[in-house]
Image: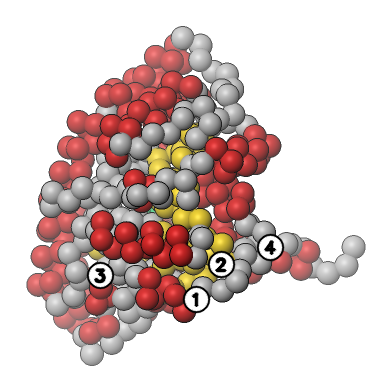
């Protein structure tokens, strides 16, 4: 054997950095009295009816593997949900795959479609896994900066210069983590036209699709004219139903792509946990009213944090979806990482530097408002203290 252990690791693994989000959890976990606006996780417990359905299933002795693609009753519920909500018709036998969170679905989607060196357009700032999973799948992530002036919505004009003979797909995530941006129907129609022109596959991560505010309805990319076949739609239960720990999500797409994803899933995961699948059936059958209540609460928090940051003098556009706000901290004279590090040291408030979501997030920080109103109020007081003392 020659070389160090780390030299023997796969070049793809060596080339990716650990997630910039985790670093701040580690600092926060060693401190007393920290208020975390860092975590992208609901502070609610999964609604009881959902937990109970799992307990009941266990009592009945449902502890086995399931079909690789997932329990038929869950796939049927998912297909029905999309029919009712978006008038999208998916065959639950061939066009639905139940996965271990959107995380697995994302990995499977990328691994199914990418040949080595294929390029994926990724609007930025973006969720930390998009670029890393593209690299791990042998592809090349091509970051395309969205502009704050346009509330971080991506446009074909911004994407066009990055098209090459190797561009295979575009990976979009709206409502967006980390910015809270949404895309209106008109914005998405332009992206659909762009995808058609360049014959791209569209991976659309709509995990925050149920979390929109101010009466806005989420626009599902696959529901745009002639986009269903071209789109790999990813969604799950983690955020809307406060089910992060259950690890359950799904992918919808054309039968060939779903079959390819199922092949990888079969060999690597076998199936999603049956307990989580039973719970997900209940979430779709009876969980909506609980989900809507949580969304109402996020909305109150959203308005509080948006107004609070504005009063402090940290500009942020009003987030219309997800549970994040992305204030501009450049007026303090600090960069993103420096701001986050100094804030946690001085005031014990954890948030995530914007550059963890790509270089275009530099100058911003991500605050999650998936935490209680008293905690958000106290965090705002502390941030105000910090900004007053440190504004340069
Ligand atoms: N996609 C986005 C945009 C996310 O923010 C997250 C989690 O933070 C995920 C996917 C992963 O979700 P899951 O828990 O379903 O794996």
For image coordinates 20% across by 78% down, the residue present is 387
Q: Earlier in the sequence, mark 2 or mark 4?
A: 4
Q: Of circles 2 and 4, which is in front?
A: 2
Towards the viewer: 88 or 42: 88
Q: Secondary structure at mark 4?
A: loop
Q: Are marks 4 and 1 in contact (CB under 8 Å)?
A: no
Q: Secondary structure at mark 2?
A: strand
Q: Which residue is mark 3?
A: 151
Alpha-carbon distance for marks 2 and 3? 25 Å
Q: On the rendered image, what quadrant is the N terminus found in?
A: bottom right
Q: Secondary structure at mark 3?
A: loop
Q: Name the residue that disc number 2 marks.
A: 167
Q: CA distance from mark 2 to mark 4?
A: 12 Å
Residue lying at 78% horizontally and 64% vertically, measured from the top left: 8
| Residue 108 x %, y % | 57, 47
**Which of the 4 image quarters holds residue 312?**
bottom left
Q: Please tell me how crowded label 1 is: few (under 14), some (14-19), or many (20+) other residues with Cα within 10 Å.
A: some
Is disc 1's CB within 8 Å of ligand 1? no
The residue identified by callout 4 is 116
Return the residue found at the far right: 1
């Amino acid at each position: 054997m020659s070389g160090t252990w780390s030299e023997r690791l796969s070049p793809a693994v060596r080339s990716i950095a650990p997630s910039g989000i985790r670093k701040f959890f580690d600092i926060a976990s060693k401190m007393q009295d920290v208020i975390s606006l860092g975590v992208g996780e609901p502070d609610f417990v999964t609604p009881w009816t959902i937990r109970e359905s799992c307990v009941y299933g266990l009592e009945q002795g449902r502890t086995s593997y399931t079909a690789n693609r997932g329990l038929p009753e869950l796939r049927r519920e998912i297909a029905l949900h999309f029919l009712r909500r978006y008038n999208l018709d998916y065959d639950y036998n061939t066009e639905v795959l139940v996965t271990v969170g959107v995380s697995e679905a994302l990995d499977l989607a990328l691994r199914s479609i990418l040949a080595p060196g294929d390029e994926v357009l990724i609007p930025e700032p973006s969720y930390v896994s998009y670029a890393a999973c593209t690299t791990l799948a042998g592809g090349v992530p091509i970051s395309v900066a969205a502009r704050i002036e346009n509330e971080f919505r991506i446009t074909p004009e911004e994407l066009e210069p990055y098209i090459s003979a190797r561009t295979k797909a575009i990976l979009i995530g709206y409502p967006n983590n980390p910015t809270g941006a949404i895309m209106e129907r008109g914005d998405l129609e332009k992206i659909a036209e762009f995808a058609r022109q360049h014959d791209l596959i569209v991976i659309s991560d709509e995990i925050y699709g149920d979390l929109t505010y101010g009466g806005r309805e989420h626009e599902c990319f696959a529901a745009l004219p002639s986009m269903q076949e071209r789109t790999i739609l990813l969604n799950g239960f983690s955020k809307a139903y406060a089910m992060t720990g259950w690890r359950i999500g799904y992918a919808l797409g054309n039968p060939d792509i779903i079959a390819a994803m199922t092949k990888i899933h079969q060999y690597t995961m076998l199936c999603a946990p049956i307990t989580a699948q039973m719970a997900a059936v209940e979430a779709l059958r009876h969980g909506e009213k609980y989900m809507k209540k949580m969304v109402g609460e996020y909305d109150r928090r959203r308005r509080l944090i948006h107004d609070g940051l504005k009063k402090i003098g940290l500009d942020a556009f009003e987030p219309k979806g997800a549970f994040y706000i992305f204030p501009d901290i450049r007026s303090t004279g600090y960069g993103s990482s420096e701001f986050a590090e100094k804030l946690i040291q001085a005031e014990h408030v954890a948030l995530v530097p914007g550059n963890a979501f790509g270089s275009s997030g530099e100058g911003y920080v991500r605050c999650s408002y998936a935490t209680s109103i008293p905690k958000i109020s106290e965090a705002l007081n502390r941030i105000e203290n910090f900004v007053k003392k440190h504004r340069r």
